Image: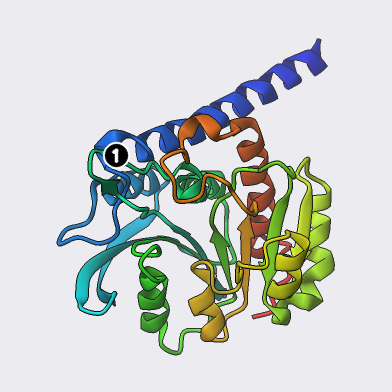
Amino acid sequence: MQWLRINFTLLFLFSCQSYSLERDMLILTSPEFEGRPSGGAQPHRSAYYITRQFEKYGLEVRFDQFEFEYGFFDSATGHNVVATQYCTRMQCHSPIVITAHYDHLGTRGSRYFPGANDNASGVAVMIDIARQLQGIDVNRDVIFVATDAEEKGLHGAKAFVKQLSDTQIHMNINLDMLDLQRKNKLYALASRSLQPMKETITSTFASTPVKFQLYFSAKIMARRLNAPQIDWLRASDHYPFYRADIPFIYFGAGVDKHHHSVNDSLDKINFEKLTQVSNAITKFVLSQVSNNAAATS
């Protein structure tokens, strides 16, 4: 009976977590959020929603405004949502930065682009990681950045990295398109500087239900995913960190046939698997911020 009670409790908690992910994605992909277009004179309503979720978990949240140019003559204002869980120890290690872009393609005429996998999935998992870290005595600041204007040229990530100046960053973890596809596998591309951590990274995921494949070469990743047209190094917000010589690891589920179409919708998302992905990535984050984390910087 005791075993049954424990399992029912775990099932209940798992169901609540899955509901939380689904709720966040339902709201982020709703028509009221208009496909979360990049940039605007004021923060988009989706940015305010993300802010409220971070605040629920006791994080200090701010908007970082930036200007960006796109195309030949166009310019706009973007707003990153930056939320921080602070290290309160006497001695703290260098921060870890977790990124996920919240903008998408907006509307085209009477149609809107929900952007469920791209990238409501990454934002929802980032919020879920913040929930799971609530109350943890972290040994380094954990900075969550919901970036704007990724779709226009990674501008939110570029603006955030630029303001870091000489701040030493332990690692960037970038989350983009996390719904497991046909191959049912989570992929990661990491900077070569993280190769000494290969065993730590892979062993973390080996103890989870998630099938996982780690690469240190964008070309090899493209070849193995049969997607030679995609430059995985430059494809998302980890690239500005790479350019600044900041170690990164990018998590994604590979090619999605519904990418940048109106069919990238909530009904395509497998929330049971997304919950497993969130738990697995959180486990890796914990390996970098908890008491027994190997602090290399």
- Please tell me how crowded label 1 is: few (under 14), some (14-19), or many (20+) other residues with Cα within 10 Å: few
Residue, x 67% and y 62% (percent of image)? Answer: 227
Residue, x 64% and y 31% (percent of image)? Answer: 272
Left or right: residue 290 versus residue 210 is left
Choose between 94 and 38: the one closer to the eye.
Answer: 38
Q: Which residue is mark 1?
A: 111
Amino acid, disc 1: Arg
Q: Position of residue 156 (x, y in %)?
A: 36, 69
Asked where in the image residue 248 lies, by quadrant, the reply is: bottom right
Choose between 37 and 228: the one closer to the eye.
Answer: 228
In the figure, 27 relative to 251: above or below?
Answer: above
Q: Position of residue 182 (x, y in %)?
A: 70, 41
Choose between 146 and 119: the one closer to the eye.
Answer: 119
Q: Position of residue 176 (x, y in %)?
A: 53, 56
Asked where in the image residue 72 lies, by quadrant, the reply is: bottom left
Asked where in the image residue 169 lies, by quadrant, the reply is: bottom right
Q: Residue extending furthest top?
A: 1
Disc 1 secondary structure class: strand
Left or right: residue 243 versus residue 200 is left
Q: Residue extending furthest left?
A: 41
Residue, x 36% and y 81% (percent of image)? Answer: 163
Q: Quadrant of the N terminus?
A: top right
Left or right: residue 160 versus residue 173 is left
Q: Quadrant of the C terminus?
A: bottom right
Counting every numbered tag in the picture gives 1
Q: Position of residue 88 (x, y in %)?
A: 49, 65
- The answer to whether any part of residue 127 appears in the image is yes
